[in-house]
């Protein structure tokens, strides 16, 4: 075959001429005008099929060597159901009933909840008291301590500093915190503990609930001294998921070192304020008494107040206090990261960075006997990403979120990236475990209300290729 010779086809590629030892082709007969031929002999399919991948996969003529485009022509998945809001409205009474029944079952002093759809807080509710003794009602502007829901802010800060070139996720932690060098490897073949290990709860630190929950007010000097004594490890890094509050306290110190600013200041200036979260704070004493939820635990004699802990170096694992209105702004930004698209990025963080947080990194659990609202078997698996939990059930429904629990408080949020919906709840009861009711409400929205996921339309390129293939079939000569 002579190089450079070929017959051009619609996709821009070249089909080689026949080998030189073949008989010369006869001149192609002119088509007689008339109706188009809608069928071709089956004998042509093997020959024609050889070139389908070239036709379908090629997005530009091969002969023209041009600079790579900024992005491909991509049709973004989108919601096509015009009744999304109406479907949410259809289950509002059941949503409220679920939360009220849960509050009664758990004997929560106060509980607030919110449902987000397409980035907006579409439905909210509140019941009970933020402060039992003063009879202050819980409301949407009440500041609740959200405990470990803070962890995703810490992870986001680390990724933002990565994006800014201040660190790398595979940096050894000891590069940023030299005190960790006092910790001997668990085994001779263990790799160094990296920032990625801390983010994904796989550093090898033993699970530290509820010990870590009581360390919130420890100062930086206390954490540094703790590290100098050397840490006990339960696994080599990267081997297994073990929930570690200590790991996120260390990440908070990494943020301080890499940014040159105190952790809390970095989060406030680089994340909270850009989002307009002006009622989200670190120190409970900064909140007006009428806007602060006091934490409680249940006793045989009734609710017993839990002492509020001041903010300290462990704030990176669970120190934030926020309101429903404020936190909805944060969740809206996560929802807005989906789907991947060609729109310009806006704001303080890239959408791709947020989506990176939402990916599974370390397997964390299997719910083999989980069931749907209708009682059908619906197993699911879960994993930990970067400051967020991830899960998917047997229907392929993906959820992302986190729980929070401290003495006096329990909270949870979960969002469904493919469905554009989120459920948030805060309670002022020790380890209230609102993740269970949030899961039921999420099921109401998807299973009963029938909120569909986005639909991926055929891309313009695929539609073009479909037309080109149809045209090519009409004129194809199987003798070629």
Image (cartoon, helix red, strand yellow):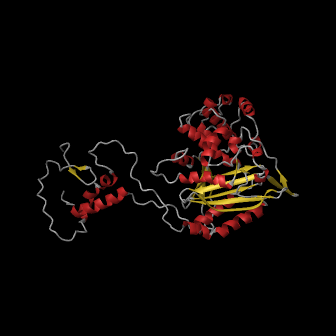
Q: Residue at x 28, y 63 (%)?
A: 470
Kindly indicate the quadrant of the structure image that contains residue 381. Answer: bottom right
Horizontal arrangement in the rendering, residue 47 relative to residue 108 (left or right): left
Q: Residue at x 39, y 50 (%)?
A: 72
Q: Residue at x 26, y 62 (%)?
A: 471
Q: Can the viewer see residue 321 in this picture?
A: yes
Quadrant occupied by the C terminus: bottom left
Depth order, front residue of 458/118: 118
Count how many numbered circles sit on residues in the image.
Answer: 0
Q: Can the viewer see residue 187 in this picture?
A: no
Percent position of residue 231, x then y: 71, 34
Horizontal arrangement in the rendering, residue 248 relative to residue 475 (left or right): right
Residue 119, placed above or below residue 71: below
Percent position of residue 37, x then y: 22, 68
Percent position of residue 242, x then y: 66, 44
Percent position of residue 311, x then y: 74, 41
Kindly indicate the quadrant of the structure image that contains residue 302. Answer: bottom right
Horizontal arrangement in the rendering, residue 234 relative to residue 292 (left or right): left
Depth order, front residue of 378/102: 102
Q: Residue at x 75, y 35 (%)?
A: 219
Quadrant occupied by the N terminus: top left
């Amino acid at each position: 075959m002579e190089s450079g010779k070929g017959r051009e086809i619609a996709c821009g590629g070249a089909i080689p001429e026949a080998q030189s030892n073949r008989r010369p082709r006869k001149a192609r007969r002119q088509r007689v005008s008339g109706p188009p031929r809608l069928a071709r002999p089956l004998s042509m399919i093997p020959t024609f099929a050889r070139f389908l991948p070239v036709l379908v996969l090629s997005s530009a003529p091969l002969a023209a060597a041009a600079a790579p485009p900024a992005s491909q022509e991509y049709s973004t998945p989108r919601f096509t159901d015009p009744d999304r809001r109406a479907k949410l409205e259809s289950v509002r009474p059941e949503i409220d009933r679920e939360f009220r029944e849960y509050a009664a079952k758990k004997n929560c002093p106060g509980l607030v909840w919110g449902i987000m759809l397409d980035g907006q807080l579409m439905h909210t509710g509140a019941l009970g008291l933020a402060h039992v003794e003063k009879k202050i009602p819980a409301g949407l502007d009440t500041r609740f301590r959200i405990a470990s829901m803070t962890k995703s802010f810490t992870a986001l800060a680390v990724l933002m500093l990565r994006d800014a070139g201040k660190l790398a996720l595979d940096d050894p932690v000891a590069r940023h915190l030299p005190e960790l060098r006092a910790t001997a490897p668990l085994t001779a073949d263990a790799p160094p503990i990296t920032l990625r290990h801390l983010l994904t709860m796989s550093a090898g630190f033993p699970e530290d609930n509820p010990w870590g929950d009581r360390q919130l007010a420890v100062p930086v000097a206390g954490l540094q001294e703790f590290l100098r004594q050397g840490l006990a490890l339960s696994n080599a890094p990267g081997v297994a998921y073990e929930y570690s509050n200590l790991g996120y306290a260390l990440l908070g110190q990494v943020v301080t070192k890499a940014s040159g600013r105190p952790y809390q200041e970095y989060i406030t200036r680089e994340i909270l304020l850009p989002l307009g979260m002006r009622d989200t704070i670190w120190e409970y004493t900064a909140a007006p008494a009428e806007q602060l939820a006091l934490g409680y635990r249940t006793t045989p004699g009734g609710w017993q107040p839990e002492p509020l802990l001041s903010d300290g170096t462990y704030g990176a694992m669970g120190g934030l206090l926020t309101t429903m209105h404020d936190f909805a702004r944060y969740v809206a930004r996560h929802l807005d990261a989906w789907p991947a698209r060609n729109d310009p990025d806006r704001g303080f963080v890239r959408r791709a960075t947020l989506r990176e947080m939402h990916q599974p990194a370390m397997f964390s659990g299997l719910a083999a006997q989980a069931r749907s609202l209708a009682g059908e078997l619906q197993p699911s698996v879960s994993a930990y990403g970067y400051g967020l939990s991830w899960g998917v059930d047997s229907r392929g429904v993906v959820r992302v979120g986190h729980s929070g629990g401290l003495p006096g408080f329990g909270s949870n949020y979960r969002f469904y990236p493919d469905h554009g919906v989120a459920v948030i709840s805060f309670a002022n009861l020790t380890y209230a475990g609102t993740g269970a009711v949030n899961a039921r409400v999420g099921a109401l929205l998807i299973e009963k209300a029938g909120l569909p996921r986005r639909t991926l339309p055929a891309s313009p390129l695929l539609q073009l290729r479909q037309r080109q293939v149809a045209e090519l079939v009409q004129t194809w000569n199987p003798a070629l």
